[in-house]
Image: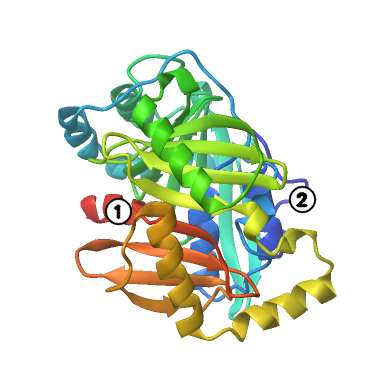
Amino acid sequence: MRRSPNPSKTVSIHQVEQMIRDTETPEHSMSQQIVEKLELKGVPPQKPFFTRRAGIITAALVAFCVFLTPVMAQTIERLSLLEYINPFVKEMKVNPNEKVDTLYAQGSDGNKQFHTGMIRFDDIEDQEFKSQLQRVWDEIFPQGEGINDVIMYEYERDTYHIEARNENRSIEFDQGNWYYAKQTIGEDQVPDAAKDAADRAFNKVGDFKQSKRSVSQMILRPDQNPVYKFVYETNKGSILIDVQKNTNQIIRVLAFPLSDHLNKLDDNKYRDLVEKTKAIKLDKVREETVKQAKVWMNLDLAEYNVSKLEHRFDTLTFTKAGSPDVTALFTSKGTIYSIEIELRELSEKGTD
C-alpha cells in the first residue's frame, strides 16, 4: 500500500489534496469531491482546482468500450456497499501493516482528522465486502480487467468514500452507493455524432490552431447516458470538452488558454489577480456567462438564479428548479473560461 512518509502529522489542505492526487489517474476523481467538502467545512482554498491540473491530462487508450442500456443502468443504480463498509473500514484501521494514514488538515476552525488508505484488492480479508464490490464491478464493467486497488477516504467521522480501480477503469462510492465510474477509451469507440458535436463546440471557443484531438475517458453515472471526455491540444494550451452520448449535449467546456494561468504566477501576482477577480460585479460576469453558455453549449441560462460560491473567488453557480446546477469559472477580466452542467448532482439525488 502507498503510504505517506510520516503518518499522523499536521499538513495543509494543499498537501492533503496533493497526496490524494498522487494515487489517482487524471481528470475527474474522488479527490475533487473530498477537497471540495473539506473546503466547504472552512478550510481556506488554495489556487483554483482546475488550473492546478493543467498539463496532466493524458489519454490511455484501450481496445473496447462498454455502453449501458437503460435496464442495466437501473439495475446498477440499486447496488450498494453500505452494509459492508464498516467491517472493511475496521479491517483497514486495525491492520498491523498500518494500511491507513492519519492526517490533519489545518482549517480556520482547527485541525480536521482525515484518514486515507489503499490496499490491493487481492489482499482484502473481508470476503463479504470483497464479493459485493466485485459484483458491482462486474455489473458496470462486464468485460475487461479486474480490480487492482481499493482506496478508502474518511474525511469526517463515519463518512466514507471508496474507490475501486485498475489502470483503465474506476468506480467511486459515496457512503456505499456508486455515483461515478470511468474508463479509458479509444476514439474509434465514440460515435461520429458525438465527435461532430465536440468539434463544433471547440470551433466556437476561439481561434485556436488545433494540433490534436483525443478522447481520454468515458464517464458513467447511475441512470444517465455516458459522457465522452474530449481533449483538444492547441498551440495555446488544452481545451476540454465533454459530450453526452445519444443527446450529444455539450456538458462541459474548459478552455485553459482563456484562463488567468494562476498556477504559473508567483504569490504576489496571484494575490493581486485574486483581489481583482473578487472585485468584479456579479451582474457583469453573469451576463458574460449567459452569452458564452448559449454560444458554446446552446444552453439558455437566462432564467437561472446565480450566486458566487462563498469559498471560491472565481466561481458562479447557476440554479433553476428541476434542472441540474451549472458552474462557471471566470477570470480577473470578467471573461469565462469554463462552464459545466453538474450532472453528478442528479446521480447523487437518485441514490437518496
Sort mark 2 into few (<14), some (14-19) or many (20+) by Cα contacts within 10 Å: few
- Circle 1: residue type: Glu
Residue shown at 28% from the left, 24% from the top: 139
Left or right of 111, for residue 178: left
Asked if 99 appears above or below 159 in the picture, the reply is above
Q: Residue furthest front?
A: 207
- Quarter of the image where the C terminus is located: bottom left
Label 1 residue SS: helix
Q: Is residue 217 visible?
A: yes
Residue that label 1 marks: 348
Q: Quarter of the image holding residue 84?
A: top left
Looking at numbered disc 2 in the image, what kind of residue is underneath it?
A: Asn
Label 1 environment density (alpha carbons within 10 Å; few <14, some 14–19, many ≥20): some
Residue 338 x %, y %: 52, 58
**Front label number (1 vs 2):** 1
Q: Which residue is mark 2?
A: 6
Q: Nearer the viewer, residue 71 or 125?
A: 71
Residue 154 visible in the snapshot: no
- The tag earlier along the polypeptide, 1 or 2, is 2
Q: Residue at x 51, y 17 (%)?
A: 62
Give residue 178's position: percent from left, percent from top: 33, 41
Please give left or right for residue 272 compared with residue 60 in the image.
right
Q: Quadrant of the N terminus?
A: top right
